[in-house]
Image (cartoon, helix red, strand yellow):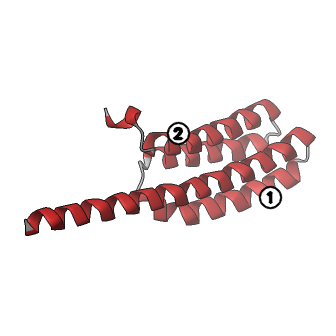
């Protein structure tokens, strides 16, 4: 009976941690999606210097804050975001609007995919 109670307590604690981390990561993903949208606006306006500056800030802050989530969630998507950021950096330097907007969309999709893959719903249980 004692082992059952301990197992139930650990299960509840694990689930609470999972819900908490998913909620915090959702805030993280929304923040970086909003930042990506601001870079997108700079690109659409043709303000390449502001876009490059915003991208440098985005890249620095993303690389610093992803480390805490790297251990909890599937890190494959974080690698994809870093790859897309590198391609975006090159396309902003080349002032290629089409490629830049495509990479912004890929970054937003990768952040959304992390949330989608880690959600707790019946599609991910069965």
Screen quadrant of the N terminus: bottom left
| CA neighbours of label 2 inside 10 A, class few (<14), some (14 to 19), many (20+) | few
Q: Which residue is depicted at the point 57% across and 53% down?
A: 26
Screen quadrant of the C terminus: top left
Q: Position of residue 77 (x, y in %)?
A: 49, 44
Q: Position of residue 95 (x, y in %)?
A: 83, 39
50 horizontally vs 25: left or right: right
Residue at disc 2, secondary structure: helix
Q: Which residue is depicted at the point 87% across and 38% down?
A: 44
Residue at disc 1, secondary structure: helix
From the viewer's side, name the closer residue of 16 and 62: 16
2 horizontally vs 12: left or right: left
Which residue reaches farthest front?
1
Give residue 118's quadrant in the image: top left
Q: CA distance from mark 1 to mark 2?
A: 26 Å
From the viewer's side, name the closer residue of 69 and 2: 2
Establish if 86 lies above or below 31: above
80 horizontally vs 87: left or right: left
- The tally of labels here is 2
Q: Which residue is depicted at the point 68% across and 48% down?
A: 33
To which residue does mark 2 refer? Answer: 113
Give residue 99's quadrant in the image: top right
Mark 1 vs 2: CB contact within 8 A:
no
Q: Position of residue 88 (x, y in %)?
A: 70, 43
Mark before the other along the chain sequence, 1 or 2: 1
From the viewer's side, name the closer residue of 122 and 5: 5
To which residue does mark 1 refer? Answer: 53
**Front: mark 1 or 2:** 2
Q: Position of residue 43 (x, y in %)?
A: 84, 42
């Amino acid at each position: 009976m004692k082992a059952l109670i301990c197992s139930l307590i650990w299960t509840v604690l694990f689930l609470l941690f999972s819900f908490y981390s998913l909620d915090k990561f959702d805030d993280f993903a929304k923040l970086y999606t909003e930042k990506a949208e601001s870079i997108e606006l700079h690109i659409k306006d043709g303000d390449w210097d502001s876009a490059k500056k915003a991208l440098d800030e985005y890249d620095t802050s993303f690389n610093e804050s992803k480390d805490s989530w790297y251990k909890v969630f599937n890190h494959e998507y974080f690698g994809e975001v870093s790859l897309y950021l590198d391609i975006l950096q090159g396309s902003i330097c080349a002032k290629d609007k089409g490629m830049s907007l495509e990479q912004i969309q890929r970054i937003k999709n990768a952040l959304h995919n992390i949330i989608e893959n880690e959600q707790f719903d019946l599609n991910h249980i069965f």
